[in-house]
Amino acid sequence: MLADTIGELLKGFDDKSDRRALKRILYFLEKAGYTPQEPDEDNQPPTDRAPFERAYMVSADAQGDTTVVYAYQRDRKVRWLLARINETLGVVGAKEEECAAEEAEAKAARYAESRVFPSVMAEVPAPFARWRLKRALALNRNGAPTTIAYWRSHLEQASEVPHPALELPRQAATEDDLRTTAVGMDPTLMWRLELGAATPLLRSLQEAHLDRAEISENDRRTRTDAIIDEARNEAFNEIAIQDHATRLLDLAYLLDRAGQAGSGLLMAAYDELRERGCDSQYARGVMDKTVVIYVETMRAAGDARTAKR
């Protein structure tokens, strides 16, 4: 009912003007005899059948955004939340869908069959999805997408769930495996650091190459390695480490759920990243990849400017 929806939205909005507007609508509805009910009241499905609840997750994209699809049933409708969450920014995008309870299983089957190459998508436990959404929502500093307002009160009831990937077995891996293979799998090919973090690095590298006439090739290579090491130490701070560690956990778990190979190597990379941080082979591989992507991006932009002349 409309009154129920307004009541749920009222719990989700923080802005005072939005709350005043919703309260005014609710006032008129109550005057007309419509009173919002709490989700646990009599408008729930019969107790002999558990309400529909399902969740799916898509591994992180180039920006580090992970998509979570979460659905739960209220009355005879199933609402679906599709949210993009980021380990540093919170919920960065959200939309919702709705279907009749009788159509929910068919809709879930379509999600289960979805392919999002090069990312990986798989079903995950609903309590884990609720926790990830709640944790992400807590990171939003400048307000969350308006779509999330309806869901806030429901998500706030979620309890912390340890990441299920932590129970996965680890694969014995060489440094080369960790540096090249783990960051060269199809789902990780687009992972990188923020390109903005590479700008000072590229400027320093350019200066080093401009001086190549004054120093030997060996000295120039040593200087270049030192510049990259310094940049990696700055770029792979605790925030970046936590972000990429979560990406590795998510991907390892989704690969395992999807019956695909590679989870053991990713868990080995996760362990090394948590232990060695910016000195890990994974961090070195991602930094190298970031530099290459940045150089290629700058070269493409230069070629485009030249072509316009």
Image (cartoon, helix red, strand yellow):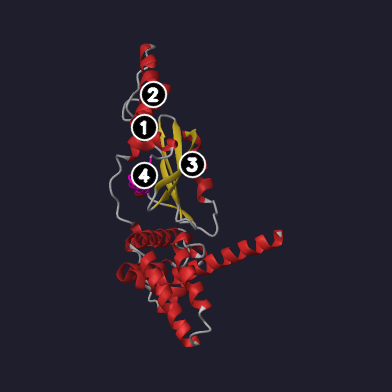
Which kind of residue does numbered mark 4 sit on? Asn
Q: CA distance from mark 1 to mark 3?
A: 31 Å
Q: Quadrant of residue 137?
A: top left
Real-space CA distance between mark 2 and mark 1, rounded to the nearest whole angstrom:
9 Å
Front-most of residues 288 and 39: 288
Task: State which region is magenta.
Answer: 129-142
Identify the residue at horizontal 54%, vertical 54% (top origin).
Answer: 116
Find disc 3 in the rendering and name its residue: 105
Circle 4 residue: 140
Q: Are marks 2 and 1 in contact (CB under 8 Å)?
A: yes
* Circle 1 residue: 13
Q: Residues within 10 Å of mark 3 (few under 14, many from 20)?
A: some
Q: Amino acid at mark 2?
A: Leu
Task: Give yes or no for contact between labels 4 and 3 (Cβ–Cβ under 8 Å).
Answer: no
Q: Which numbered circle lies on residue 22?
A: 2
- Residue sitting at 37 percent across and 53 percent down? 88
Foreground tag (2 vs 3): 2
